[in-house]
Amino acid sequence: MSRKLGIQEGSAQLMLCPCCGTTIFRGASDCLCGGRFVGEPLDQTPITIQRFGPAIASVLSLILVITACLIATKWLAFAAVLVIWSARRAVRLAKKDPDWYGGYKTAAATLVLTVAGGLALASYGIAHIPQALDNYKLRHIAATRAAIYHEAGRLEEYKRIFGSYPQEFKKAIGEALPEDFWGAVLKYESNSGAIAERTGSIESTGLPITHFELRSAGPDEIMGTDDDIIMRDGIFITNAELRQQSAAQQLR
């Protein structure tokens, strides 16, 4: 048989003519329909394309966490746990099936870098936890001091109009004292207490009230302890300073 008929000695493989679909032997130079072959048929073996998505995702996650820490707050570094998970997943996939998943070295480097950076940031964070708690406490104290300042301003306005501070805050101002940051109501005292104890009635003295005290129980929410937030006559003072003043007055 001639090669025109699509028969080649020693060949037993069949194929379809790309032009007419006639079954011919593989390796024939042409077909009866007139079609001519210019090269070997394409290999039917599937082409495998490696996937770099997991590795790239781990790198992008690391960049995102670093950027967030620099722009927002360093405490977002705890999100590095997600980066570690992503990089570890990419390493595992690339190691298990290297034909399908690439970027093993990139993912491994990202994992090592993230773990090392995470340990460093964790050490830094643990070392600064006491400072962070102190700052948190100071913000609460500052908020309570601001509330005390506001009420002191109202007392000063009352004194400007009536010539003395009120004996009772709510009765004079018309509103109850606000709460401090920890939910306890601020306490108000005037210097009428000691006078009333001596005379039996503040009204009978006819003396103006020229001193006042606003007090918060502070973070421990217990009155009379060293963390009380105290204002006397517009000046903040501590319990320790009050004890020193009392001791000095007793020595006179």
Image: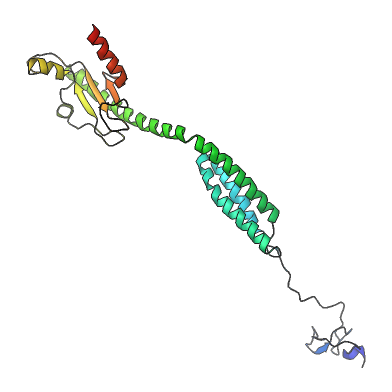
Residue at 39% of width from left, 30% of height from top? Answer: 138
Q: Is residue 84 visible?
A: yes
Name the residue furthest top.
Answer: 252
Quarter of image, res 166: top left
Q: Is residue 186 above or below residue 240?
A: below
Q: Position of residue 10 (x, y in %)?
A: 90, 87
Q: Horizontal placement of 54 versus 12: left or right?
A: left
Tell whether 214 sits left or right of 139.
Answer: left
Q: Nearer the viewer, residue 70 or 105?
A: 105
The image's colour scheme reads rainbow
Picture quarter with the C terminus: top left
Residue 211 lies, in percent from the top left, at 21, 17
Query: Where is the N terminus found, in terms of image quarters?
Result: bottom right
Seen in the image, is 38 located left or right of residue 245? right
The residue located at (66%, 52%) in the rendering is 108
Which residue extends farthest bottom?
1
35 over 78 or under it: above or below: below
Q: Quadrant of residue 13?
A: bottom right
Count of marks, rendered view:
0
User: Percent from the top left, x then y, of residue 74?
Assistant: 52, 39
Q: Is 66 placed above or below 186 here?
A: below
Tell me if residue 72 can be seen: no
Residue drawn at (22%, 31%) of the image: 177
Q: Which residue corresponds to the image point at 27% horizontal and 17% vertical from the top-left?
A: 243
Give the x, y percent position of residue 82: 55, 51
